[in-house]
Image: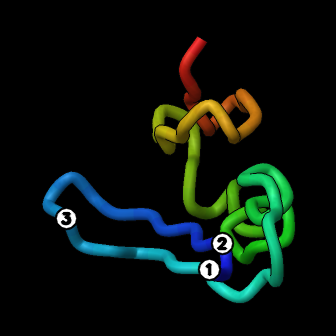
Amino acid sequence: MSPTQAVALPNLVFTHAYVGWPGSRTDAHILKHSKLWRRTRELFPAGHYLIGDSGYPLLNWLVTPF
């Protein structure tokens, strides 16, 4: 089974999906190799955030549990 990363809006519309890393990779590894990571300034300007689970790093645009 390949790890999958997906992003959806509050109205449940998917805006991003990233699939294909073989084996078990961490959420942070998949994030850092996705287009989402390379486009953070464009996708998350000041005041816009993404909510992630505890497998993701805490960043100025990515809110994770504490």
Residue pictured at 62% horizontal, 31% vertical: 54
Number of on-image labels: 3
* Label 2 sits on residue: 3
The crowd level at tag 2 (other Cα within 10 Å; few <14, some 14-19, many 20+) is some
The numbered dot on residue 60 is: none
Instruction: Locate residue 15, reporting x and y percent.
Output: 40, 75
**SS for dot 1:** strand
What amino acid does circle 1 point to? Answer: Tyr
Q: Quadrant of the C terminus?
A: top right
- At numbered mark 3, what does the secondary structure look like: helix, strand or loop? loop
Q: Amino acid at mark 3?
A: Leu
Where is the N terminus found, in terms of image quarters? bottom right
Q: Nearer the viewer, mark 2 or mark 1?
A: 2
Name which residue type carries label 2.
Pro
* x 69%, y 29%: residue: 60
Q: Work out whether mark 2 precedes mark 3 in sequence or the reverse, and give the earlier one.
A: 2
Q: Position of residue 11 (x, y in %)?
A: 14, 60
- Mark 2, mark 3: which one is toward the viewer? 2
> Picture quarter containing residue 41?
bottom right
Q: CA distance from mark 3 to mark 1?
A: 17 Å
Q: Measure how far apart labels 2 and 3 are at the Cα level.
A: 20 Å
User: 19 or 15: nearer the eye?
Assistant: 19
Can you tell which quarter of the image residue 61 is in?
Answer: top right
Instruction: Tell me, yes or no, if residue 10 can be seen here.
Output: yes
Marks 2 and 1, how far apart in space? 9 Å
The residue under label 3 is: 12
